[in-house]
Amino acid sequence: MRRPPVIRPATPDDAALLAELNRFVHDMHAEHRPDLYRKDPPAGELADGFRRQLGRDDVRILIAELPGGTAAGYAMATVHHRAANVLMAADSHITLEHLAVDPRAARQGVATALLEAVRAAGREAGCRRFVTDVWDFNTEALAFYRASGFTPMRRLLDQPL
């Protein structure tokens, strides 16, 4: 039986690794939406961006490692707390911003382990919901999220001007 990936919090020393792991999902986004995503973003700038995110109290970045310590993916999530107002009830949720898995580690439980770790981080932060979004072109991710218990909440529509 295969051992599950080990999930650990990322540290600032992981910034370059996160930039490398990000490539697996970023390249797909850049291919499908070149109007929004830069092709081949500079690795140093991307690593600096991850370092900044790691310095935020509301951001959780987790790394999945396969047995032997090989990094196979990461998840980045943001905790949101909103007070009630005249229109909206109070809310607390964690939003999955990034989920990237090395294709060589596909179907080894990496994405599922990362989702479970983000769920746990959300519960620990007092969140009552787990939210994410996915591009319509990413049919594999859509199927994964639905199989993981996510249901559609709303539609974000886009139109060039």
Image (cartoon, grey):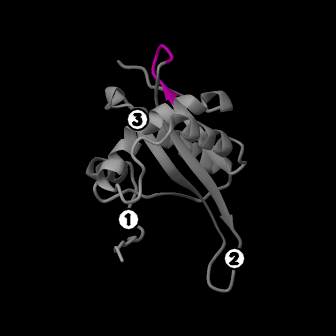
Characterize the magenta stretch by its predominant secondary structure.
loop
* Residue 44 lies in the magenta stretch: no
Looking at the rendered image, the quarter that the N terminus falls into is top left
Q: Secondary structure at mark 3?
A: strand
Q: Amino acid at mark 2?
A: Ala
Find residue 152 and name its label.
1
Q: Nearer the viewer, residue 75 or 38?
A: 38
Q: Nearer the viewer, residue 123 or 54?
A: 54
Measured Cα–Cα span from mark 3 to mark 2: 36 Å
Measured Cα–Cα span from mark 1 to mark 3: 23 Å
Find residue 84 and name its label.
2
Q: Give the residue at the far top of this rendering.
A: 68
> 78 above or below 120?
below
Q: Which of the 4 image quarters holds residue 89?
A: bottom right
Q: Are marks 3 and 2 in contact (CB under 8 Å)?
A: no
Q: Tag 1 or tag 2, which sits nearer the N-term?
A: 2
Residue 144 visible somewhere in the drawing: no
Q: Amino acid at mark 1?
A: Pro
Within 10 angstroms of label 3, few (less than 14), some, or many (20 or more) residues? many
Q: Which residues are magenta?
A: 64-69
Task: Name the residue located 44 percent from the left edge and 25 percent from the top edge.
Answer: 4
Q: Is residue 127 left or right of residue 158?
A: right
Within 10 angstroms of label 1, few (less than 14), some, or many (20 or more) residues? few
> 24 above or below 68?
below
Q: Which of the 4 image quarters holds residue 54?
A: top right
Within 10 angstroms of label 2, few (less than 14), some, or many (20 or more) residues? few
Nearest-to-viewer mark from 1 and 3: 3
